[in-house]
Image (cartoon, rainbow, N blue to C red):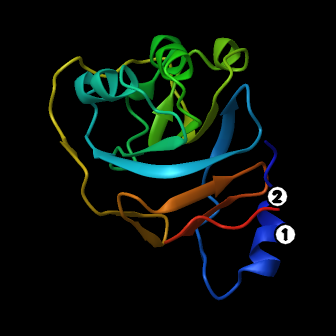
Amino acid sequence: MQYNTSELCDFYADLIDVVDPIFCNYGGRSSFAGKVVTLKCFEHLGLINELVAIDGTGKVLVIDGGGSTRRALIDLGIAQCAANNGWEGIVCYGSVRDVDALDGVDIGIQALGAIPVGASEQNIGETDMAINFAGVTLLPDDYIYADNTGIILSPEALDIA
């Protein structure tokens, strides 16, 4: 399904929060939406690997990577695993790598930028917690909508029909 964040802002101005425009679009989907699953980790991708391996149907993984641009938290393997398990998208307050290959994976990915250096495999981090970045607080079970124009957040699913 295609989402238009500009139209959603017009219709739901009093309900949504707008994420600061600091993200770039990667991945094969230009728009995506779903229920938020939160993860906080810094330059470690062990927990990311665990989460993308479970069923993510109707969900978006939101990673607070501390804004690090020194190590990539999303690579081709993680993106492909997430797509294979039904995740709608990933929003990463951090970096990606394998940019050209990510474009061929059927998943939406928004991140701060790209760097070729990968993160460590350690299982360090926390899940299912409130996270703060880009001018918003994201809670587990919020709803997120993203396209090439931006990212918006809602405490409840928006009626798209």
Q: Are marks 1 and 2 in contact (CB under 8 Å)?
A: yes
- The picture quadrant where one finds residue 101 is top right
The residue that appears at 35% across and 44% down in the rendered structure is: 65
Gap between marks 1 and 2 measured at Cα: 6 Å
The residue that appears at 25% across and 51% down in the rendered structure is: 128
Q: Which mark is residue 4?
A: 2
Residue 130 % position (x, y): 29, 63
- The picture quadrant where one finds residue 43 is top left
Q: Is residue 19 visible?
A: no
Question: Label 1, on which residue?
Answer: 7
The residue that appears at 40% across and 25% down in the rendered structure is: 52
Q: Nearer the viewer, residue 121 or 130?
A: 130
Residue 3 % position (x, y): 78, 52
Q: Nearer the viewer, residue 27 or 118?
A: 27
Q: Is residue 28 visible?
A: yes
Q: Nearer the viewer, residue 72 or 145?
A: 145
Which corner quadrant holds the N terminus? top right
The residue that appears at 59% across and 64% down in the rendered structure is: 157
Q: Is residue 149 left or right of residue 59?
A: right
Q: Is residue 65 left or right of residue 91?
A: left
Q: Nearer the viewer, residue 35 or 63?
A: 35
